Image (spheres, rainbow, N blue to C red):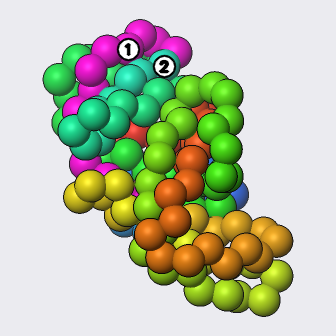
Amino acid sequence: MSPGRRPIGTPIEIYTKPASLFAASFIGLTNALPGVVTRGNARASHVRVAEGLELESADGGFPSDKQVDVLCRPEQLALSTSRPDGPNVFQASVEDTAFMGNSADVLLTRGPLKLKAQISPAVHWQPATELWVKIAPEAVRLLP
């Protein structure tokens, strides 16, 4: 490392807790959505990403009305045909499924939102199939 330069983090740190949208997209695929914080505290935040869709994030310390980038990695989206319990559960429609061998890339839409999920083992859903999506609050990253 050259003098005056400080490390930005290990690859795992950059992947799981990126400091910027550029860093998040540089290492691996990510879903990046614009959002507005609706409420929060030092330990968690709630953010509106689209009309009628609010997600809980384990990232805290953001004031209400703060515009943020909401990030979640495709492999952190859990998909099912039945409604799971817990926070961050919503329905989305399959736009396309790409078989990748032992996994599948699933492009989902919910109104104007487009999300990519990577699931393993591979399942092929037909376009227009309605699925339940679940994202753990720890997987929802917020960047100012």
Question: Given contact means CB atoms under 8 Å apart, are the residues at marks 2 and 1 in contact?
Answer: yes
Residue 35 seen in this snapshot: no
- In the rendered image, the vertical position of residue 61 relative to residue 135, given as above or below: above
For this rendering, which residue is in front, 74 or 44? 74
Answer with the quarter of the image where residue 11 lies: bottom right
* Location of mark 2 (residue): 44
For this rendering, which residue is in front, 1 or 92? 92
Please state the horizontal and vertical placement of residue 102, each as a whole percent of the image.
82, 82
Please state the horizontal and vertical placement of residue 122, each as a whole percent of the image.
76, 76
Which image quarter is the N terminus in? bottom right
Q: Residue at x 58, y 42 (%)?
A: 135
Residue 43 seen in this snapshot: yes
Position of residue 34 in the picture relative to residue 87 (left or right): left
Q: Residue at x 47, y 27 (%)?
A: 56
In what element is the residue under mark 2?
A: loop
Please state the horizontal and vertical placement of residue 6, each as a whole percent of the image.
50, 55
Position of residue 82 in the picture relative to residue 66 (left or right): right
- Near mark 1 (Cα within 10 A), the count class, few <14, some 14-19 or many ≥20, is some
Q: Furthest residue to the top?
A: 41
Which image quarter is the C terminus in? top left
State yes or no: residue 29 in magenta: yes
Q: Residue at x 31, y 15 (%)?
A: 39
* Location of mark 1 (residue): 40
Position of residue 12 in the picture relative to residue 33 (left or right): right
In what element is the residue under mark 1?
A: strand
Please state the extent of the stretch shown in magenta in the rendering: 26-43
